[in-house]
Image: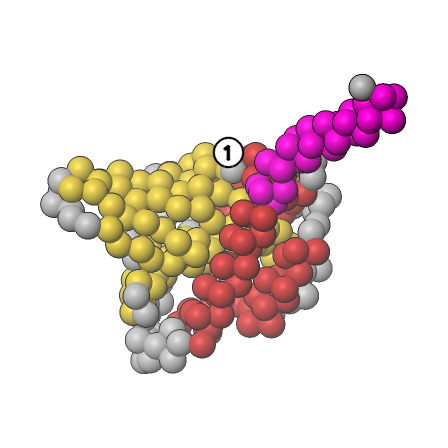
């Protein structure tokens, strides 16, 4: 093999290895960006619905918004549900919306279930206790912070008092959702990949040490509806 051919082959091999090494990171990034985009769509869906007046009128009081674009419930006799979510928080001093931080949600259930159901959910974080629970690495809704189903309907005027108030949408139909018992965990690997460094939810939502251009559209949409910057 000539020196030139050997050098060309070596360059090709090195390029292929480098591409293979980078590929998983690029894929992870695209999955996270896809979730952020889906969260924006979910939020817009809730905002546009005429039956979601309580949500629309009270989202401005929320300290945070946890958006899960796709929660899958499946099983037969023994089942459960789960999905990924993003959390945005409103800085108390500046009024600026920051985030997202990435989370996973999972719950188990016992009872008759058949088939698969897919819902999108938004949980309003109404208290400091609720926000502090989400800043932990893992917590259980209902145990570590109270959770209630949000009122729905054009004339809904219920005074709901809870740390977390949850809404869901399934196949175009909105309704209250009981997330009691759902375990919420931080997705550290997704946070690290999205921001390109090791970060925890407090770094993102409290200390605001990082930001991402890929989240600007979602943050702007939430700020437009919920107030703030």
> From this viewpoint, which residue is outermost toward the front?
1
Q: Secondary structure at mark 1?
A: loop
Seen in the image, is 12 located left or right of residue 50?
right
- x 45%, y 76%: residue: 48
Would you name the residue on which mark 1 appears? 137
For the record, the magenta segment spans 2-29
Closer-to-camera residue (4/52): 4
| Quadrant occupied by the C terminus | bottom right
Q: Residue furthest right?
A: 3
Verify whether residue 63 appears in magenta. Answer: no
Q: Position of residue 208 (x, y in %)?
A: 70, 47
Where residue 174 appears, as percent x and y from the top left, is 31, 68
Residue 71 percent coordinates (x, y): 36, 51
What residue is shown at x 77% (from left), y 27% (from top)?
9
Can residue 84 be seen in the rendering of this structure? yes
Q: Quadrant of residue 227?
A: bottom right
**What's the coloring here?**
secondary structure
Please indicate whether residue 16 sits to the left or right of residue 55 in the image. Answer: right
Quarter of the figure with the N terminus: top right
Q: Residue at x 60, y 72 (%)?
A: 224
Q: Residue at x 44, y 46 (%)?
A: 84
The residue closer to the viewer here, 76 or 58, is: 76
Q: How many marks?
A: 1
The percent position of residue 200, horizontal first and vertical second, equals 61, 36
23 inside magenta stretch: yes
């Amino acid at each position: 093999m000539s020196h030139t051919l050997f050098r060309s082959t070596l360059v090709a091999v090195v390029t292929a290895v480098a591409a293979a090494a980078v590929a998983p990171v690029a894929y992870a990034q695209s999955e996270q960006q896809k979730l952020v985009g889906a969260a924006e769509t979910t939020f817009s869906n809730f905002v546009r619905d005429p039956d979601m007046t309580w949500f629309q009128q009270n989202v401005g009081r929320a300290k945070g918004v946890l958006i899960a674009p796709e929660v899958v419930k499946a099983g037969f006799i023994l089942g459960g549900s789960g999905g990924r979510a993003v959390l945005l928080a409103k800085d108390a001093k500046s009024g600026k919306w920051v985030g997202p931080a990435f989370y996973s949600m999972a719950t188990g259930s016992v009872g008759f279930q058949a088939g698969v159901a897919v819902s999108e959910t938004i949980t309003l974080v109404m208290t400091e206790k609720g926000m502090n629970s989400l800043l932990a690495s893992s917590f259980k809704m209902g145990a570590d912070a109270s959770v209630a189903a949000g009122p729905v309907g054009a004339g809904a005027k219920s005074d709901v008092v809870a740390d977390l108030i949850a809404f869901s949408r399934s196949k175009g139909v909105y309704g209250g959702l009981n997330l009691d018992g759902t375990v919420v965990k931080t997705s550290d690997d997704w946070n690290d990949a999205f921001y390109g460094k090791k970060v925890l939810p407090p770094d993102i939502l409290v200390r605001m040490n990082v930001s991402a251009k890929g989240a600007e559209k979602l943050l702007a949409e939430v700020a437009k509806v919920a107030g703030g910057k």
